[in-house]
Image (cartoon, coloured by chain):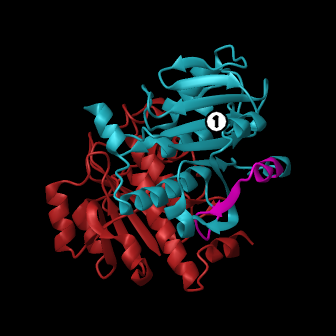
Chain colours: A red, B cyan
Amino acid sequence: MRDIVIIGHKAKTDGDFSLNDLPGSAGRMDILCRCVSSALFLSFGMRRDVNVHLLLLGEPDPGKIIRFEGLHLRYLNPDERSSGSLIQKALKKDATEQDIRSTPGIWIRRGDLSFLLSKFEGRTLFYLREDGEDIRAIANEIRDPVFFLGDHVGVTEEEEEQLLKAGAKIISVGPLSLHSNHCITLVHNELDRAEAQRGESPGEIERWIEN
Amino acid sequence: MRDIVIIGHKAKTDGDFSLNDLPGSAGRMDILCRCVSSALFLSFGMRRDVNVHLLLLGEPDPGKIIRFEGLHLRYLNPDERSSGSLIQKALKKDATEQDIRSTPGIWIRRGDLSFLLSKFEGRTLFYLREDGEDIRAIANEIRDPVFFLGDHVGVTEEEEEQLLKAGAKIISVGPLSLHSNHCITLVHNELDRAEAQRGESPGEIERWIEN
């Protein structure tokens, strides 16, 4: 299983935004939409072994988490507007401290970074930063990882402190500073290659389900 | 310089489509928009050493080429709607056999794959296909490349024949079949890493221009 957390510091926390203006009215929700797409799509199907967690910290009700479960997802297309529309639908639910199912494979709840870190206790945590260790050097050893990424403003000092305290390892994906969705594509590729080298077949679950 | 060609077999060739429905009304223009974004954006700026060529083959007037020049581009944001809007603006120009400038860094003209192949004569051509040679094995030797990618329907047999006849080498980016925009991110990363290893600084042009 690969879990990917993206922190959206400005992302709106109610459904009151226009799908025609995801960058503006929705607080750079376009970034999160692209991350969802990069995390979940293969050319002819979906990565069923991936969950995406969007931590939304914008106004008017900061601290909501929307979870996309690759295994159960339906109605998601790769375009930004498609994930934007499913996010908006989830945000129209009354979020509580419990998971509420919005559409197949999409859940919403209240929560913050501490909640996510306690949920992932025992897993191998990675935090992506430009000056981290090159993932390519360690991809072969990675099993059952959770990746944390920031949005256009990165990760705050306080969040970084929480991540490091929880044992997250800092990794990077290359020599240049890239958008979060591009980093996700690169992380997947390193793990796909490592799995293929080990003779594992990353697409197997997908094919099994489709049949 | 890196040139990237994406063939959009269904992509509309007039500006008569809705930005609210890039996948449907615009003939999977969403795919091309994501490719533009992956090809050109760095975290804090643009890849000034990259040109993107969208070959549009859909109705009603097949055979138009829109060129995004990283060096001169303005008004492009990373969201799909932003590139979609600039593509629409270019398609509203009367395209001829000569380049016509639409907005800064964006040009449109009539043309087909043969035209592009003759334009790139002398360059090193690569065609991305799942079963190609791993780019990672040869990234260090690549200089001044042109990459050709298909859309959701791939590349037709006839196009493939043209590409191979022009000397294009078939390469792949990993063990799984991925969306074109994800392939572009991976190609860039391999070349960025190779350039960094050689002590070249891929972001240099960008910084020079910004100052």
Residue A1 lies, in percent from the top left, at 47, 76
User: Closest to the observer: A33 or A74?
Assistant: A33
Instruction: Please give the name of the residue rendered at 72% of the width and 40% of the height, measured from the top-left corner.
Output: B117
User: x and y percent of residue B79 in the render?
Assistant: 46, 37
Q: Is residue B168 highlighted in magenta?
A: yes
Q: Can you name the residue that lies furthest to the bottom here?
A: A198
Q: Is residue A29 above or below residue B129?
A: above
Q: Where does label 1 land, which residue?
A: B54
Residue at far top of view: B94
- Lateral position of residue B94 relative to residue A165, left or right: right
Residue A98: quadrant of the picture: bottom left
Residue B96: name its quadrant. Answer: top right
On the image, the x and y values in percent for residue B38 come to: 49, 46
Front position in the image: B150 or B121? B121
Pick out the residue farthest to the front: B122
Residue at 42% x, 56% y is: B192
Please report the residue visible at 43 percent of the width from the left and 53 percent of the height from the top: A181
* Residue B42 versus residue A171 in the image, above or below: above
Tell me, yes or no, if residue A82 can be seen here.
Answer: yes
Where does the image place residue B161, in percent across and percent down from the top left?
83, 51
Which is more toward the observer, A16 or B88?
A: B88
Amino acid type of the residue that numbered disc 1 sits on in the rendered structure: Leu
- In the image shown, does A16 or B59 lie closer to the viewer? B59
The mark total stands at 1
Residue at image position (58%, 83%) is A200
SS at badge 1: strand
Q: Is residue A67 visible?
A: no
Chain letter for mark 1, please. Answer: B
The span picked out in magenta is B161-177
Placement of the C terminus of chain B among the 4 image quadrants: top left
> Per the image, is B34 magenta?
no
Q: Residues within 10 Å of mark 1 (few under 14, many from 20)?
A: many
